[in-house]
Amino acid sequence: MLQDPRIGSNATTVNTWLSSGALTPDGRCALSECEASLNNIFDSYPIYSLSIRNDCHLLWSHYAACHTGFCIEFEFPDDQPEQVAYREHIECVPLIDFMKSSFGLVGEDFGTRIHDALLVKMNCWAYEGEYGWIASDELAPGGVPKGRKFVKVRYERQWVKAISFGCRTPASVKTYIRKHLPFTTEFKQAVEAKDSIEIVPCDDL
Protein backbone atom coordinates (compact mmCIF):
# COMPACT_ATOMS: atom_id res chain seq x y z
CA MET A 1 0.00 0.00 0.00
CA LEU A 2 1.17 3.53 -0.82
CA GLN A 3 1.51 5.50 2.41
CA ASP A 4 3.12 8.79 1.31
CA PRO A 5 1.06 11.49 3.10
CA ARG A 6 1.68 14.01 0.30
CA ILE A 7 -0.69 12.08 -1.97
CA GLY A 8 -3.46 12.65 0.57
CA SER A 9 -6.97 11.68 -0.57
CA ASN A 10 -5.58 10.32 -3.87
CA ALA A 11 -3.84 7.44 -2.09
CA THR A 12 -6.88 5.15 -2.34
CA THR A 13 -7.12 5.68 -6.09
CA VAL A 14 -3.37 5.23 -6.63
CA ASN A 15 -3.39 1.99 -4.68
CA THR A 16 -5.88 0.50 -7.17
CA TRP A 17 -3.31 0.88 -9.94
CA LEU A 18 -1.08 -1.94 -8.72
CA SER A 19 -1.69 -5.50 -7.72
CA SER A 20 1.02 -8.08 -6.97
CA GLY A 21 3.65 -5.80 -8.47
CA ALA A 22 1.83 -5.33 -11.81
CA LEU A 23 -0.43 -2.67 -13.25
CA THR A 24 -4.14 -3.31 -12.95
CA PRO A 25 -6.55 -2.33 -15.75
CA ASP A 26 -7.18 0.91 -13.81
CA GLY A 27 -3.42 1.42 -13.58
CA ARG A 28 -2.90 0.94 -17.31
CA CYS A 29 -5.74 3.37 -18.02
CA ALA A 30 -4.26 5.95 -15.63
CA LEU A 31 -0.84 5.54 -17.24
CA SER A 32 -2.32 6.08 -20.70
CA GLU A 33 -4.20 9.19 -19.51
CA CYS A 34 -1.06 10.63 -17.94
CA GLU A 35 0.89 10.04 -21.14
CA ALA A 36 -1.81 11.81 -23.16
CA SER A 37 -1.82 14.71 -20.69
CA LEU A 38 1.94 15.12 -20.89
CA ASN A 39 1.88 15.07 -24.69
CA ASN A 40 -0.93 17.64 -24.68
CA ILE A 41 1.15 19.94 -22.48
CA PHE A 42 4.10 19.70 -24.88
CA ASP A 43 1.83 20.34 -27.87
CA SER A 44 0.23 23.38 -26.22
CA TYR A 45 3.40 25.46 -26.15
CA PRO A 46 3.30 28.12 -28.91
CA ILE A 47 6.93 27.93 -30.01
CA TYR A 48 8.24 29.75 -33.08
CA SER A 49 11.46 28.45 -34.60
CA LEU A 50 13.99 30.94 -35.92
CA SER A 51 17.61 30.91 -37.02
CA ILE A 52 20.51 33.32 -36.69
CA ARG A 53 21.52 32.36 -40.25
CA ASN A 54 20.04 33.75 -43.45
CA ASP A 55 22.88 32.57 -45.69
CA CYS A 56 22.64 28.79 -45.32
CA HIS A 57 21.96 26.76 -48.47
CA LEU A 58 20.26 23.97 -46.52
CA LEU A 59 17.90 26.32 -44.68
CA TRP A 60 16.82 27.98 -47.93
CA SER A 61 16.37 24.58 -49.53
CA HIS A 62 14.48 22.95 -46.64
CA TYR A 63 12.30 25.82 -45.42
CA ALA A 64 11.91 28.17 -48.37
CA ALA A 65 10.73 25.79 -51.10
CA CYS A 66 14.19 25.29 -52.64
CA HIS A 67 15.11 28.99 -52.60
CA THR A 68 11.78 30.15 -54.12
CA GLY A 69 10.36 31.45 -50.85
CA PHE A 70 11.46 34.27 -48.56
CA CYS A 71 13.01 34.85 -45.15
CA ILE A 72 11.56 37.20 -42.52
CA GLU A 73 14.04 39.00 -40.27
CA PHE A 74 12.63 39.71 -36.81
CA GLU A 75 13.80 41.91 -33.98
CA PHE A 76 12.16 41.15 -30.65
CA PRO A 77 12.10 44.09 -28.20
CA ASP A 78 11.05 42.22 -25.06
CA ASP A 79 11.00 38.44 -24.64
CA GLN A 80 14.03 37.31 -26.61
CA PRO A 81 14.24 33.97 -28.45
CA GLU A 82 16.28 31.37 -26.60
CA GLN A 83 19.17 29.48 -28.13
CA VAL A 84 18.50 25.82 -28.86
CA ALA A 85 20.92 23.39 -27.20
CA TYR A 86 22.31 20.69 -29.50
CA ARG A 87 23.14 17.41 -27.83
CA GLU A 88 23.82 13.78 -28.65
CA HIS A 89 20.34 12.78 -27.50
CA ILE A 90 17.05 14.66 -27.35
CA GLU A 91 15.80 15.67 -23.94
CA CYS A 92 13.90 12.99 -22.01
CA VAL A 93 11.01 13.80 -19.68
CA PRO A 94 10.11 10.52 -17.94
CA LEU A 95 6.40 9.91 -17.53
CA ILE A 96 6.93 8.81 -13.93
CA ASP A 97 8.35 12.26 -13.11
CA PHE A 98 5.24 13.89 -14.55
CA MET A 99 3.03 11.61 -12.46
CA LYS A 100 5.06 12.37 -9.33
CA SER A 101 4.78 16.08 -10.07
CA SER A 102 1.00 15.75 -10.41
CA PHE A 103 0.88 14.40 -6.86
CA GLY A 104 3.26 17.01 -5.49
CA LEU A 105 6.04 14.50 -4.88
CA VAL A 106 8.72 16.63 -6.55
CA GLY A 107 9.51 20.21 -5.78
CA GLU A 108 10.72 21.35 -9.19
CA ASP A 109 8.65 23.48 -11.54
CA PHE A 110 7.62 20.90 -14.14
CA GLY A 111 6.61 23.64 -16.56
CA THR A 112 10.22 24.85 -16.57
CA ARG A 113 11.41 21.32 -17.29
CA ILE A 114 9.10 21.03 -20.31
CA HIS A 115 10.12 24.51 -21.48
CA ASP A 116 13.79 23.50 -21.37
CA ALA A 117 13.12 20.19 -23.16
CA LEU A 118 11.49 22.05 -26.06
CA LEU A 119 14.77 23.86 -26.65
CA VAL A 120 16.92 20.77 -27.17
CA LYS A 121 17.66 19.13 -30.53
CA MET A 122 20.11 16.50 -31.72
CA ASN A 123 23.59 17.49 -32.88
CA CYS A 124 22.80 16.72 -36.52
CA TRP A 125 20.61 19.86 -36.62
CA ALA A 126 23.29 22.19 -35.28
CA TYR A 127 23.90 23.75 -38.71
CA GLU A 128 20.52 25.51 -38.38
CA GLY A 129 21.71 27.78 -35.57
CA GLU A 130 18.18 27.65 -34.20
CA TYR A 131 16.55 29.82 -31.59
CA GLY A 132 13.09 29.20 -30.14
CA TRP A 133 10.64 31.94 -29.23
CA ILE A 134 7.84 30.80 -26.94
CA ALA A 135 4.98 33.26 -27.04
CA SER A 136 3.82 34.64 -23.71
CA ASP A 137 0.33 34.07 -22.34
CA GLU A 138 -0.44 37.67 -23.25
CA LEU A 139 0.31 37.07 -26.94
CA ALA A 140 -1.10 33.55 -27.13
CA PRO A 141 -3.66 33.05 -24.34
CA GLY A 142 -4.09 29.37 -23.59
CA GLY A 143 -1.34 28.33 -25.98
CA VAL A 144 -2.05 26.04 -28.93
CA PRO A 145 -5.60 24.61 -28.66
CA LYS A 146 -5.89 20.85 -28.33
CA GLY A 147 -6.11 19.18 -31.73
CA ARG A 148 -4.51 22.15 -33.50
CA LYS A 149 -0.97 22.29 -34.88
CA PHE A 150 -0.52 26.03 -34.64
CA VAL A 151 -2.05 29.22 -33.31
CA LYS A 152 -1.95 32.77 -34.66
CA VAL A 153 0.15 35.02 -32.45
CA ARG A 154 -0.19 38.79 -32.41
CA TYR A 155 2.97 40.72 -33.23
CA GLU A 156 3.95 44.32 -33.73
CA ARG A 157 4.83 45.40 -37.27
CA GLN A 158 8.05 47.06 -36.11
CA TRP A 159 9.35 43.59 -35.17
CA VAL A 160 9.73 42.82 -38.89
CA LYS A 161 13.08 44.37 -39.77
CA ALA A 162 13.47 42.97 -43.30
CA ILE A 163 12.27 40.43 -45.82
CA SER A 164 14.85 38.58 -47.90
CA PHE A 165 13.77 36.95 -51.14
CA GLY A 166 15.30 33.65 -52.17
CA CYS A 167 17.65 33.18 -55.11
CA ARG A 168 14.78 31.75 -57.16
CA THR A 169 11.80 33.66 -55.78
CA PRO A 170 9.60 34.48 -58.82
CA ALA A 171 9.40 38.16 -59.71
CA SER A 172 5.61 37.96 -59.46
CA VAL A 173 5.87 36.85 -55.82
CA LYS A 174 8.27 39.67 -54.98
CA THR A 175 5.98 42.22 -56.59
CA TYR A 176 2.91 40.85 -54.80
CA ILE A 177 4.57 40.95 -51.36
CA ARG A 178 5.93 44.45 -51.82
CA LYS A 179 2.59 45.71 -53.08
CA HIS A 180 0.38 44.11 -50.44
CA LEU A 181 2.51 44.24 -47.29
CA PRO A 182 0.50 46.58 -45.02
CA PHE A 183 3.58 48.30 -43.59
CA THR A 184 7.01 49.47 -44.70
CA THR A 185 10.11 47.37 -44.16
CA GLU A 186 13.48 46.70 -45.77
CA PHE A 187 13.73 44.23 -48.63
CA LYS A 188 16.79 42.12 -49.37
CA GLN A 189 17.80 39.57 -51.98
CA ALA A 190 19.62 36.25 -51.55
CA VAL A 191 22.28 35.80 -54.22
CA GLU A 192 23.90 32.45 -54.91
CA ALA A 193 27.68 32.80 -54.85
CA LYS A 194 30.19 30.07 -55.61
CA ASP A 195 30.25 28.52 -52.13
CA SER A 196 27.72 30.54 -50.18
CA ILE A 197 24.58 32.65 -50.12
CA GLU A 198 24.99 36.41 -49.98
CA ILE A 199 22.22 38.74 -48.81
CA VAL A 200 22.23 42.10 -50.61
CA PRO A 201 19.85 45.09 -50.76
CA CYS A 202 16.84 44.64 -53.03
CA ASP A 203 15.98 47.99 -54.55
CA ASP A 204 15.32 47.02 -58.16
CA LEU A 205 11.56 46.31 -57.96
Image (spheres, rainbow, N blue to C red):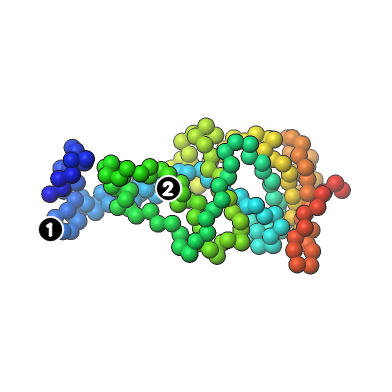
Q: Where on the picture, by quarter, is residue 58?
A: bottom right
How many numbered marks does the figure carry? 2
Which residue occupies the foreground of this view, 177 or 20? 20
In this picture, is 179 found above or below 132?
above
Evaluate whether residue 65 shows in this view: no
**Which residue appears at 71% of the width and 57% of the height?**
55
Mark 1 vs mark 2: give the one in front: 2
Q: CA distance from mark 1 to mark 2?
A: 33 Å
Element at badge 2?
helix
Find disc 2 in the rendering and name its residue.
114
Element at badge 1?
loop
**Residue 160 at x, y = what percent?**
69, 40
**Residue 114 at x, y = what percent?**
42, 48
Find disc 1 in the rendering and name its residue.
20
The single residue placed furthest to the top in the displayed view is 138
The single residue placed furthest to the right in the displayed view is 204
Q: Within 10 Å of the Cα at label 2, are there few (<14), some (14-19), or many (20+) other Cα atoms?
A: some
**Residue 205 at x, y = what percent?**
85, 46
**Which residue appears at 73% of the width and 35% of the height?**
182
The single residue placed furthest to the bottom in the displayed view is 194
Q: Within 10 Å of the Cα at label 1, are there few (<14), some (14-19), or many (20+) other Cα atoms?
A: few
Give the side of residue 20 with respect to residue 151, left or right: left
Amino acid bearing label 2 = Ile
**Which residue appears at 50% of the width and 47% of the height?**
149
Give the side of residue 151 with respect to residue 180, left or right: left
